[in-house]
Image (cartoon, grey):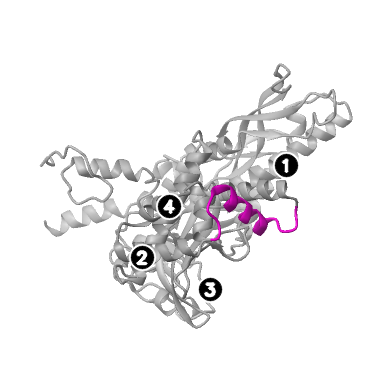
Amino acid sequence: MNIQDRREISREYFSRERLAEHHFRSFNAFLNRGMQEVVDEKATIETDIGDKEGEEPVYVELGDVRVVTPRVREADGSEELLYPQEARLRNITYAAPVFMEMAIIKGGEEEEERVVDQTETKIGRMPVMVGSDKCNIAGFTREELIDIGEDPADPGGYFIVNGSERVLMTSEDLAPNKILAETDTKYGDTIEVAKTFSQRRGYRALVLVERTRDGLLEVSFPSVSGSINFVTLIRALGLESDEEIVHRVSEDPEIVKFMLENLEAAEVQSTEEAIEELGKRVASGQGKNYQLKRANYVIDRYLLPHLHEDGVEEEDVRINKAYYLCRMAEACFELALDRRDADDKDHYANKRLKVSGDLMKDLFRTALNKLARDVKYQLERANMRNRQLSVSTVVRSDVLTERLEHPIATGNWVGGRSGVSQLVDRTDYMGVLSHLRRLRSPLSRSQPHFEARDLHATQWGRICPSETPEGPNCGLVKNFAQAMELSQNVEDEQGLKQELAAMGVSGIPGIESIDQQPADD
């Protein structure tokens, strides 16, 4: 390959679109699928109308959501297309109206349901990424960009809020829904811990299985103070017999011996006793019926939420949770017996990156919940005053708009995170490119975190080994390597394994019986 060919390839690869492509792909996926997924999760807005005797219940059904291209409302009431340069010069937000189908439905299961009002209404405005599919300059030629005052070399990938250019920082975090085993020092003793960050629909719960110095297993998860005996929780989930519990953990004789110690120390022998014991922990001092109700709610809502699937029976979900906890227990015992090494938290296979679309999805979910609460309040108030219920009067579009624009303008994100959005570094062109390809760690810069700051072997080809700031952020703020490609929305892991196996790739865990075909040359 001669030098001219190399230059052509390099020029093509490092084009204007590719330098911030991971931001574009992520944000476009959010607009095309992510927003609708969040709306489908919510599905309906319940109200307290109908609690009184003789009153028909009322609720709101949510439908399709769509975003148009950025617009600006002028003083005379007209709406015009808005371009990024105009938003910068006028100190306004480069945002597009968001429309959603909403239907107010009266009547419940006993009465005949009927639609009171159904329409597509404007629910607010969403900041649009410059250069994304919904951007007004998407697909413009160099000459057209120059004509409207845009810089044809500008890479895009950022938002304009109140005239300021704000880029969402790619966030690095531990992989959710994955078992990580490690040793920990607690009260002067070294114990084995298996943990997983169980994540579903924006909710993230840390579940821990610890092997204490006595060799007994304990489980910790949100909404339960302290730890719960492992066998008690497994029996509460529906696995009762000693034999089934032991074999679900492992067939290894050494691990079986450890499990028999746990079973001997168990205080409960049946599912009913286990639920009662759990109820005493989560609702101490309350009546027995409330304790049982609370115990069932806690294990269904807060324990391993990622195993919930729509349409799956609750008993099957609980059994799956029991099997998952058994796998975590096996990881603890394997670590104690030196059958496996502790998982490396700094290994890039154990990390995931949140790009613009993922961050906007979290933000939109919070904003939609706030809008739903406001719609509920407006409906109940209109009903009390005997006013006609209509979608257009109960939806206040500034509620959603404020919840979307304010975090991008300040950088204070949902979940208590700060510094998520930053002013684009316009020192020079390379500064812009560097800022768009930067990622940050959630770890505190005031702590040493020596291992997290070190250059890890798995960063080769992914993270630049030299571009990181001096001082307290060293090693915590990093930049992508030049030719890095970021895979996104790869959720169907099983399907991917099947594809690889069909191509002749052998030794894939989780694929047992499959007709392997030789890969095509």
- 453 up-or-down from 18: above or below: below
Residue located beneath label 4 in the image: 324
The amino acid beneath tag 3 is: Ser
What percent of the width, then of the height, locates residue 400?
A: 67, 44
The residue sitting at 71% across, 29% down in the picture is: 59
Q: Residue furthest right?
A: 385
Disc 2 marks a residue whose amino acid type is: Lys
Q: Which residue is mark 2?
A: 257
Q: Give the mark nearer the N terminus: 2 vs 1.
A: 2
> Where does residue 462 sit, x and y in percent of width and height?
32, 62
Tag in front: 4 or 3 = 4
**Identity of the residue drawn at 49% across and 42% down:** 317
The foreground one among 283 and 238 is: 238
Given the image, on which type of amino acid does mark 1 rest?
Answer: Arg
Q: Closer to the camera, 431 or 176?
A: 176
Of the numbered discs 3 and 2, the one sitting upstream in the chain is 2
The reply to whether discs 3 and 2 touch (Cβ–Cβ < 8 Å) is: no
Q: Main secondary structure of the magenta part?
A: helix
Name which residue type carries label 4: Tyr
Instruction: Report the span colored magenta.
Output: 267-286
Question: Alpha-carbon distance for marks 4 and 3?
Answer: 31 Å
Q: Which residue is mark 3?
A: 444
Q: Earlier in the sequence, mark 4 or mark 3?
A: 4
Identify the disc placed on residue 143: none
Calculate the distance from the C-alpha at mark 2 to the C-alpha at mark 4: 20 Å
Q: Relative to residue 33, is residue 260 depicted above or below?
A: below
Q: Residues within 10 Å of mark 4 (few under 14, many from 20)?
A: some
The residue shown at (18%, 47%) is 505
- Mark 1 to mark 4 CA distance (whole Å): 35 Å
Distance CA(mark 1)–CA(mark 3)? 34 Å
- Residue 193 on image: x %, y %: 44, 68
Q: Which residue is mark 1?
A: 373
